[in-house]
Image (cartoon, rainbow, N blue to C red):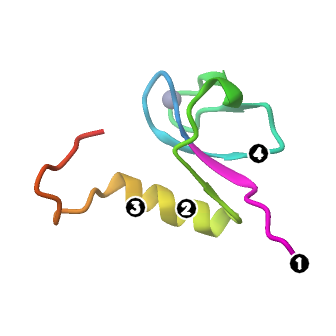
Amino acid sequence: MTEKKRFWIIKCPRCHTHQIADSRNKSKTCSQCSRRFEILDLPILASAKDAREARAIVADLKMPRTTASEPKVI
Ligand SMILES: [Zn+2]
């Protein structure tokens, strides 16, 4: 059985909050600022096979690793 990545991690174009989007949907409303945007207009930062994995990725993106020599502020 092949697993398809169903959830995408994107960033709200207005407030830059990470959002989990279902890949079956075309648009999403930001949970933070209520801005509605087209998912396909935005770069997909990561994808996940389920909501749980997607949330883990978002948590990881929110907390950049401190081991990097040049921490990048997103
Ligand atoms: Zn937003």
Residue named by callout 2: 55
Sequence-first disc among 4 and 2: 4
In the picture provided, is 6 more to the left or to the right than 31?
Answer: right
Of circles 3 and 1, which is in front?
Answer: 1
Residue at (16, 66) in percent of width and height: 67
Residue named by callout 1: 1
Of circles 4 and 2, which is in front?
Answer: 4
Is 60 rendered above or below residue 16? below
Residue named by callout 3: 60
Magenta segment boundaries in residue numbering: 1-9
Task: Where is residue 36? Give x, y as percent.
Answer: 66, 23
Residue type highlighted by circle 2: Arg
Sequence-first disc among 2 and 3: 2
Q: For the residue labelled by badge 4, is the local secondary structure a helix, a strand or a loop?
A: loop
Report the Cα–Cα distance between label 4 and label 1. Answer: 19 Å
Confirm if mark 4 falls within 8 A of ligand 1: no
Q: For the residue labelled by badge 3, is the local secondary structure a helix, a strand or a loop?
A: helix
Of circles 4 and 1, which is in front?
Answer: 1
Residue named by callout 4: 23
